[in-house]
C-alpha cells in the first residue's frame, strides 16, 4: 500500500514557496507519510532540468530522490474562447518518461510561453490538448484539475462547462479520472450520475512543502507508472482503496459569497438574492456546492457502490492549533507537531493509524481528543467562500471558556 499526491507545484509557479524544490519536497513527503509525489511543472524548462538532475529512475515511469518516489506530472492552464464564452480550464498531464516530456513540451510550446510560469497558459482547447498529448504517447493521461472551483475548472461557474462532453467533445472517452478539489469530496460528486464511470482523485495542489498531502490517494498496487494509470482507467477498488479529503466546507470555494463584503451565503441564500451581493450589488462568486446542486440528479445521501471510498481529515497542525488555542503557524504548534512526528513517524500515521490508547498515552490530552474527533467527523466547519478558507472548529467554545476561567482566576 502507498500514499500518493499527484498534483503539486514547483518554485517556478506563481505564488509558490521558494522551498518548492526536490530536497524540500522529499523531506516533507517523509514527514507527511507520502510515498509517491507528482513532480508538478514538468513543462517549465528550468524545473525540468532540476528534475533530470535530481531524480533517478527505479521503475517504469517512477523516479526516486532520498527514498521519496516521484511521477512526472504537470498542470497547464487552457484559456480559449468556445461556444460564445471565454473558457479557463486547468488540466493535469501524466507522462511516463523524460523523453516523452521533451516531446510534449515541444508540442505545447507552440501555444504558450513555457518559461513564463510553472503552470503555463496555453491558447489551446482542452479537447485538442488531449488529442495532442496522446499523439505523443498513448500511455500519457490527462485529468481535469479541481473540477468545481469557480475559476479555471471544468465545471467552474465563471468559465467552465455543464458537461464533460461540452469540454472534451470526441476526446471525452480518453478522460478517465477527475480531481475533486479541496472544496468537494466524492460524496458530492456521486450526486452527478454523468460522472459515474470516472475515477475521483484528490491531491493537494500544494504551493508550499508543508501543504503537500492535505489531500491524497491510497493505492494497493505496484508502484509502477503503467499499474497506476491502469488502476485509474479501470476504477479498480481493489487497487485504488480510498482518498484522503479535506472536509469540503474547509475549501475556499465551498459556498457562495463576496470576500470584499465579508459575505458568506449558502446556495439557497444566494438564489434568494439572485446571486447578487445585497451589500454592494456586485455579482457573487458562485461556489462549488451551488454548481453541484445545479448539475446533480441525485440527493445528498446517494452512495456510488463502484467507487473507492474516502476519509475526511484535518491537517495535524490545525488540530494542534485548535487544542492549544493558538494560530497554526505559531512556534508553539511547530514545536508540538515536530514532537509528535518524532514519536509516531509521520502525519498520516498519526491521523489515520495510531490506536486511540496510544494517542491518549503519548499525546497531550486535548490533542488526542482533537485527532479522535476528527476521525469521527465530530467537528464543526464554517464554510469557505470566495477565496476564503473555511474555519474548522474542533473545540468549539472550549478554548474560549478556558480563557474566561483563567481571566476570572486573577480576581
Image (spheres, grey):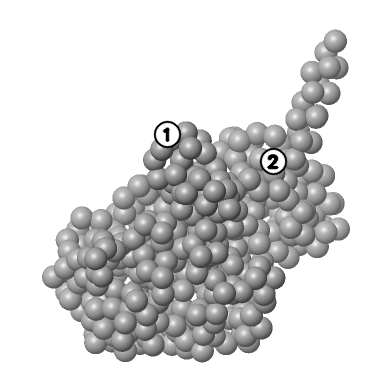
Question: Is there any visible trace of residue 226 in the rendered image?
Answer: yes
Residue drawn at x 20%, y 55% is: 116
Dividing the picture into quadrants, the one containing residue 226 is bottom left
Numbered tag placed on residue 280 in the rendering: 1
Left or right position of 115 against 342: left
Q: Which residue is mark 2?
A: 322
Residue drawn at x 26%, y 70% is: 83
* Horizontal and vertical percent position of residue 207: 42, 53
| Of 392 and 256, the residue lying toward us | 256
* Horizontal and vertical percent position of residue 387: 46, 46
| Of 138 and 347, the residue lying toward us | 138
Label 2 secondary element? helix
| Of 402 and 77, the residue lying toward us | 77
Question: Is there any visible trace of residue 36 in the rendered image?
Answer: no
Residue drawn at x 17%, y 76% is: 107
Q: Which callout, 2 or 1, points at the residue further toward the start of the chain?
A: 1
Determine whether 327 is above or below 163 in the image: above
Determine whether 343 is above or below 405 in the image: below
Left or right position of 252 against 172: right
Residue drawn at x 26%, y 83% is: 131
Crowd class of label 2 (few under 14; some 14 to 19; many from 20; radius 10 Å): many
Q: In which quadrant of the rendered image does the N terminus lie?
A: bottom right
Dividing the picture into quadrants, the one containing residue 242 is bottom right
Crowd class of label 1 (few under 14; some 14 to 19; many from 20; radius 10 Å): few
Amino acid at each position: 500500500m502507498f500514499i500518493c499526491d499527484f498534483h503539486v507545484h514547483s518554485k517556478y509557479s506563481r505564488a509558490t514557496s521558494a522551498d518548492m524544490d526536490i530536497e524540500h519536497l522529499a523531506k516533507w513527503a517523509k514527514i507527511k507519510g507520502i510515498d509517491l509525489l507528482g513532480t508538478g511543472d514538468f513543462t517549465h524548462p528550468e524545473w525540468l532540468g532540476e528534475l533530470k538532475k535530481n531524480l533517478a529512475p527505479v521503475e517504469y515511469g517512477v523516479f526516486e530522490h532520498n527514498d521519496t518516489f516521484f511521477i512526472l506530472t504537470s498542470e497547464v492552464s487552457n484559456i480559449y474562447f468556445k461556444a460564445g464564452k471565454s473558457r479557463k480550464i486547468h488540466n493535469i498531464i501524466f507522462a511516463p518518461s523524460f523523453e516523452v516530456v521533451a516531446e510534449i513540451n515541444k508540442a505545447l510550446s507552440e501555444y504558450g510561453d513555457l518559461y513564463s510560469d510553472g503552470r503555463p497558459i496555453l491558447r489551446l482547447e482542452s479537447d485538442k490538448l488531449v488529442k495532442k498529448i496522446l499523439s505523443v504517447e498513448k500511455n500519457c493521461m490527462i485529468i481535469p484539475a479541481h473540477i468545481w472551483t469557480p475559476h479555471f475548472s471544468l465545471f467552474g461557474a465563471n468559465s467552465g462547462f455543464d458537461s464533460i462532453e461540452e469540454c472534451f467533445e470526441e476526446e471525452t472517452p480518453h478522460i478517465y479520472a477527475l480531481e475533486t478539489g479541496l472544496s468537494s469530496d466524492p460524496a458530492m460528486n456521486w450526486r452527478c450520475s454523468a460522472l459515474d464511470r470516472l475515477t475521483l482523485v484528490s491531491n493537494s495542489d500544494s504551493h508550499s512543502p508543508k501543504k503537500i498531502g492535505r489531500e491524497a490517494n491510497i493505492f494497493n498496487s505496484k508502484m509502477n507508472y503503467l499499474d497506476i494509470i491502469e488502476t485509474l482507467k479501470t476504477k479498480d477498488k481493489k487497487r485504488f482503496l480510498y482518498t484522503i479529503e479535506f472536509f469540503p466546507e474547509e475549501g475556499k470555494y465551498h459556498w457562495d459569497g463576496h470576500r470584499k463584503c465579508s459575505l458568506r451565503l449558502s446556495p439557497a441564500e444566494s438564489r434568494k438574492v439572485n446571486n447578487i451581493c445585497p451589500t454592494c450589488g456586485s455579482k457573487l462568486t458562485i461556489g462549488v456546492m451551488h454548481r453541484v446542486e445545479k448539475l446533480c440528479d441525485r440527493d445528498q445521501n446517494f452512495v456510488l457502490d463502484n467507487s473507492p471510498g474516502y476519509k475526511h481529515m484535518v491537517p495535524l497542525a490545525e488540530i494542534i492549533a485548535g487544542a492549544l488555542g493558538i494560530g497554526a503557524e505559531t512556534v508553539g504548534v511547530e514545536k508540538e507537531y515536530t514532537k509528535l512526528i518524532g514519536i509516531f513517524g509521520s502525519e498520516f500515521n498519526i491521523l489515520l493509524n495510531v490506536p486511540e490508547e496510544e494517542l491518549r498515552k503519548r499525546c497531550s490530552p486535548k490533542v488526542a481528543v482533537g485527532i479522535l474527533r476528527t476521525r469521527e467527523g465530530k467537528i464543526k466547519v464554517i464554510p469557505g467562500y470566495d477565496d476564503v478558507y473555511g474555519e474548522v472548529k474542533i473545540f468549539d467554545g472550549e478554548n474560549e471558556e478556558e480563557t474566561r476561567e483563567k481571566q476570572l482566576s486573577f480576581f
